[in-house]
Image (spheres, coloured by chain):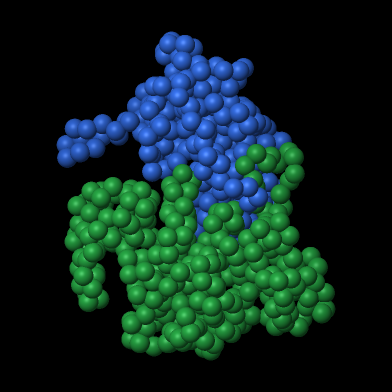
């Protein structure tokens, strides 16, 4: 078992109280597994990704544990986490431009980064990784501004995985890219997993169609909690949670026309997490909700590997 | 309603404006009343520049744009019938004022003579037209509303004018999957009132869902245009095929784009001037020469 998260709670401190952005989430990612994390904005998917590598100043670890390869990650202790960052847990952020130093050529920057971690640069390894993501080796002699968005994203991917981390967190890395570049970046991620450069991966995105192409398992979150987790194929074809069903129904496929099957959105908006209502958090928007939903539904395994948090599933 | 004829836009760049970059290259297409046309392209394809030129936000370098027979003339009379809605709804509202102030500004600028109670009734009707509940959105601050609600209020604002043409530039790309469908369905319904909509997007699935006709842009030039069913069902240009193959699908693996080695319509392309370099493959379905535009290379 590569990554095990148990009842993780991370709150944001604000002047008006604590925002319960991540409110008791448990899941596991196996060796060689890519977990796709999906949901609307504000569902806690980015908070979850950040908690696995670095809590920023506003975030408070309010409970729960994260275990990676049998060792507990000290996520609340910024300093102690340093031993794990880059070597065991690595992050590819959404905006690769802000992750690269604009005043350094890529090659020099990679060297400096590795030295700061007490490692030496293995040029042959770096070269072969660049080949793998389809980048020419000349990028090492270029400044970040000379690269396109997709190239920068792939450079950051190569840098993040240079020390062969156990877990890679990819947070919305394709959202700012065009479809053809998106495909290349997604394929490069798959290649890294297949070559064993990273053992497991958490791929965060709001795009269910893209997740379904690369993830083995998809986990859908809603308002800080797990709604449904299932193998990718099951999730797109037989979702059980009403929220996941409505989300899949709201996705236009290429070729679908509004004059044919008309898609429907989900009315309403997610509840405020400052003081979330008791019970199921999707209750206010759910067509199936009744009085029983005033009690919080437990996450139940309805089929092997298929977990749903809903009384009606 | 809207006609673009050989529209070209070049930007001056470099230290003294010595270099010219062609952002839009001899683009021609039209949008009829009661029709949605989607303009599809990747970043840098010139799709937003076209939208900005139609709205008079940037001048054209060559060619002509006409709306209902009259050329683009930015001013009150023009914006009465032509309006734009853009990507980021949050930046269109002043956060210190209530969101419905956008309606008030329309009244002050365009309809100062309308009595207050009649205006309030018109606002309520427009808000209902975009399928919002007036009680839920009027009198609220922007941060109290969702992106989808704000975006629909901007469309309601445009409906308070004598709107004939709406330029919708990436209006759903910042919205969640659960709310963007409502905005798309709304645009589809607005056609019924005879509105012409130019839907600018990089998302092929959304463009296909909405539009009667599709225009595919590549590096500023049209590579293919025609009825949506034909462009998506039977794409002729290798760039369109590659683009379609790259779209992730929910229920099917990624396709590999078929290699196109020669242009089937090469002999139809010899007369570059008359059709803007496009050959008419089937009635209404135009395609650029695959040999002329070297798009087999890596554009990422």
**B172 vs A140, nearest the viewer:** A140
Q: Quadrant of residue B25?
A: top left
- Up-down relation of residue A298 to residue A142 (above or below): below
Q: From this viewpoint, which residue is outermost toward the left?
A: B16
Q: Residue at x 28, y 47 (%)?
A: A136
Q: Which chain is green?
A: A
Q: Examine the rendered structure and indicate whether residue A282 appears above or below residue B228.
A: below
Q: Position of residue A178 (x, y in %)?
A: 45, 46
Q: Is residue B50 above or below residue A209?
A: above
Q: Is residue B8 visible?
A: yes
- Nearer to me, B151 or B127: B151
**Is A213 situated left or right of A188 in this image?**
right
Q: Is residue A182 left or right of residue A120?
A: right
Q: Quadrant of the C terminus of chain B?
A: top left
Q: Position of residue A10 (x, y in %)?
A: 51, 82
Residue positioned 26% across, 34% down in the render: B12
**Is residue A305 or residue A51 the one in the foreground?**
A305
Identity of the residue drawn at 52% across and 39% down: B256
- Work out which residue is located at the far right of the displayed protein and give it: A291
Indicate the quadrant where residue A161 lies. Answer: bottom left
* Figure label count: 0
Determine the residue positioned at 38% across, 39% down: B299
Q: Which chain is blue?
A: B
Q: Position of residue B155 (x, y in %)?
A: 60, 47
- Classify residue B285 as left or right of residue B262: right
Residue A272 visible, this orientation: no
Q: Quadrant of the N terminus of chain B?
A: top right
Give the quarter of the image for residue A90: bottom left
Residue B162 coordinates in the image, percent (x, y): 61, 37
């Amino acid at each position: 078992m590569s990554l095990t998260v148990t009842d993780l709670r991370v709150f944001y401190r604000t002047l008006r109280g604590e925002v319960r952005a991540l409110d008791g989430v448990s899941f596991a990612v196996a060796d060689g597994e890519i977990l796709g994390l999906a949901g609307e904005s504000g569902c806690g998917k980015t908070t979850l990704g950040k908690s696995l590598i670095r809590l920023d100043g506003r975030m408070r670890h309010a409970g729960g544990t994260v275990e990676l390869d049998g060792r507990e990650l000290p996520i609340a202790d910024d300093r102690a986490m340093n031993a794990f960052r880059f070597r065991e847990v690595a992050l590819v952020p959404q905006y690769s431009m802000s992750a690269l130093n604009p005043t350094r050529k890529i090659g020099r920057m990679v060297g400096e980064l590795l030295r700061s971690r007490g490692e030496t640069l293995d040029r042959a390894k770096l070269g072969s990784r660049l080949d793998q993501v389809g980048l020419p080796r000349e990028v090492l002699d270029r400044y970040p501004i000379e690269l396109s968005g997709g190239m920068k994203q792939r450079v950051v991917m190569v840098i993040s995985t240079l020390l062969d981390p156990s877990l890679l967190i990819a947070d919305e890395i394709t959202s700012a890219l065009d479809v053809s570049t998106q495909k290349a970046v997604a394929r490069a991620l798959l290649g890294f997993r297949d070559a064993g450069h990273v053992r497991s991966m958490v791929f965060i995105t709001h795009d269910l169609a893209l997740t379904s192409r690369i993830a083995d398992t998809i986990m859908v979150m809603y308002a800080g909690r797990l709604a449904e987790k299932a193998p990718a194929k099951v999730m797109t074809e037989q979702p059980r949670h009403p929220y996941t069903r409505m989300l899949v129904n709201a996705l236009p496929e290429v070729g679908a026309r509004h004059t044919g099957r008309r898609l429907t959105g989900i009315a309403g908006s997610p509840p405020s997490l400052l003081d979330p209502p008791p019970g199921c958090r999707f209750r206010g928007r759910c067509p199936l909700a009744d009085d029983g939903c005033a009690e919080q539904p437990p996450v139940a395994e309805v089929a092997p590997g298929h977990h749903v948090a809903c009384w009606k599933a | 309603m809207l006609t673009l004829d050989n529209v070209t836009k070049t930007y001056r760049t470099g230290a003294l404006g010595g270099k010219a970059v062609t952002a839009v290259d001899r683009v021609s297409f039209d949008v009829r009343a009661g029709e949605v046309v989607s303009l599809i392209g990747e970043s840098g394809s010139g799709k937003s520049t076209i939208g900005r030129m139609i709205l008079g936000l940037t001048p054209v370098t060559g060619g002509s744009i006409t709306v209902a027979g009259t050329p683009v003339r930015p001013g009150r009379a023009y914006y009465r019938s032509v309006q734009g809605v853009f990507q980021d709804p949050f930046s269109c509202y002043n956060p210190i004022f209530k969101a419905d102030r956008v309606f008030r500004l329309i009244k002050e600028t365009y309809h100062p003579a309308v009595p207050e109670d009649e205006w309030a009734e018109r606002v309520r009707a427009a808000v209902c037209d975009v399928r919002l509940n007036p009680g839920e959105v009027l009198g609220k601050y922007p941060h109290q509303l969702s992106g989808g609600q704000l975006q629909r209020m901007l469309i309601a604002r445009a409906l308070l004018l004598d709107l004939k043409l709406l330029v919708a530039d990436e209006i759903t790309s910042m919205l969640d999957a659960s709310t963007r469908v409502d905005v798309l369905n709304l645009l589809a319904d607005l056609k019924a009132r005879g509105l012409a909509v130019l839907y600018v997007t990089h998302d092929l699935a959304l463009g296909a869902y909405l539009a009667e006709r599709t225009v595919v842009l590549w590096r500023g030039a049209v590579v293919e245009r025609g009825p949506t069913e034909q462009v998506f069902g039977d794409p002729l240009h290798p760039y369109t095929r590659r683009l379609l193959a790259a779209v992730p699908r929910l229920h099917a693996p990624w396709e590999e784009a078929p290699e196109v080695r020669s242009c089937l319509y090469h002999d139809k392309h010899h007369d570059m001037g008359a059709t803007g370099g496009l050959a008419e493959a089937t009635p209404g379905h135009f395609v650029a020469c695959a040999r002329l535009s070297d798009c087999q290379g890596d554009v990422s």
